Image (cartoon, grey):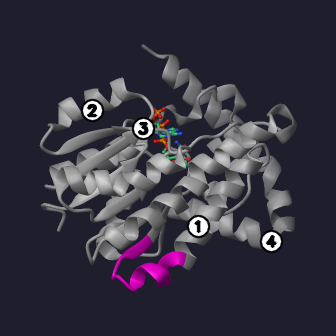
């Protein structure tokens, strides 16, 4: 079903976005890859082949550049079928640790850009296309120490669900994929990642990319990976008292798993 289709993927130069790009190209699609670092994008395009991939180096916080993007993708590839809003950033710790503008950057990168690109793209997309938001389980149950990030991801989930009706008028699917922890460079400084994040099973970028393709193929509203972590997150959100009771044991388990993860990463 992906043969000859065209996808724009923000954050397409590494981690989940790159894995989505690789899978789509393998399935016969063409990909427009967005990230800030041109050199990394160029390497990926060289690897995937210039006939199948094209680099669009831009910062998704540059909303005017984002509005112009769908037209540029159509100029390059002749059509646009899928949008994967995947570029993301997180500044962890108490909000007091970060400037107001750093916090705003999280919302602009993760949520505002997704809304702007969806709005700019959908009138020009082919029928039976799809817009997929890569949100997070942190958008299902807010994570202390990741308040603004959690808010941005909850916003992506809400947007994906509510905008579905608008997109359906053009037979475009609106979906959302919510990963738990994923083994990518996104963790950054591991010491800043709350222990509780590691209490849940770690997925690979490949597994999340499979979820994105499944979301397009099956037109599911939301896919949570791992599913069991999603159920736990929903229960914790609906029952804050239960969440408070579970918190110490989840943190203990997370701390142990985080130490094991760090040790594994240090191995040659
Ligand atoms: N890894 C996890 O544990 C996890 C869990 C749940 C959800 N997620 C979500 O999954 C998405 C992808 O994360 P990942 O794990 O694949 O991270 P990653 O490997 O760090 O990749 C992030 C990608 O986004 C690009 N990017 C970041 N800021 C950007 C900006 N302002 N404009 C354009 N591109 C930008 C990066 O390239 P440049 O730096 O060159 O711009 C890179 O291509 C994020 O939205 C994240 O919130 C991740």
The answer to whether the residues at label 3 and label 2 have Cβ atoms under 8 Å apart is no
* Mark linked to residue 157: 1
Image quarter where the N terminus lies is bottom left
The residue singled out by tag 2 in the image is: 44
What whole-number distance in Å separates the C-alpha atoms at marks 4 and 2? 44 Å
Please determine whether, in this image, residue 145 is positioned above or below residue 152. Answer: above
Q: Which residues are magenta?
A: 163-174
Image quarter where the C terminus lies is top left
Answer with mark 4 or mark 2, whichever residue precedes in sequence. 2
Answer with mark 3 or mark 2, whichever residue precedes in sequence. 3
Q: Is residue 71 visible?
A: yes
What whole-number distance in Å separates the C-alpha atoms at marks 1 and 4? 20 Å
The answer to whether the residues at label 4 and label 3 have Cβ atoms under 8 Å apart is no
The residue singled out by tag 4 in the image is: 239
In magenta stretch: residue 165? yes
Answer with mark 4 or mark 3, whichever residue precedes in sequence. 3
Judged from the image, the secondary structure of the residue bearing numbered disc 1 is helix
Residue 116 horizontal/vertical position (percent) = 52, 60
The residue singled out by tag 3 in the image is: 35
Residue 31 horizontal/vertical position (percent) = 25, 49
Quadrant of res 54: top left
């Amino acid at each position: 079903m992906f043969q000859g289709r065209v996808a724009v993927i923000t954050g397409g130069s590494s981690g989940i976005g790159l894995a989505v790009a690789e899978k789509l190209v393998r399935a016969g699609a063409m990909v427009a890859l967005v990230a800030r670092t041109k050199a990394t994008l160029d390497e990926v395009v060289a690897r995937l082949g210039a006939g199948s991939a094209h680099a669009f180096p831009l910062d998704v916080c540059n909303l005017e550049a984002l509005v112009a993007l769908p037209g540029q993708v159509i100029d390059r590839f002749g059509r646009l079928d899928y949008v994967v809003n995947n570029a993301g950033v997180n500044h962890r710790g108490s909000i007091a640790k970060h400037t107001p503008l750093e916090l705003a950057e999280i919302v602009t990168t993760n949520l505002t850009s997704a809304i702007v690109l969806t709005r700019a793209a959908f009138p020009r997309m082919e029928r039976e296309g799809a817009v997929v938001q890569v949100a997070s389980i942190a958008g299902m149950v807010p994570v202390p120490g990741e308040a603004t990030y959690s808010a941005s991801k909850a916003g992506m989930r809400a947007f994906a669900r509510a905008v579905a009706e608008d997109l359906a008028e053009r037979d475009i699917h609106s979906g959302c994929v919510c990963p738990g922890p994923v083994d990518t460079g996104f963790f950054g400084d591991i010491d800043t990642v709350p222990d509780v994040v590691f209490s849940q099973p770690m997925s690979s970028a490949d597994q999340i990319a499979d979820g994105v393709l499944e979301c397009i193929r099956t037109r599911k509203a939301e896919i949570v990976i791992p599913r069991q972590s999603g159920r736990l997150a929903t229960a914790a959100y609906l029952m804050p008292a239960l969440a408070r009771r579970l918190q110490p044991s989840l943190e203990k388990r997370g701390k142990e798993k985080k130490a094991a993860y760090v040790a594994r990463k240090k191995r040659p």
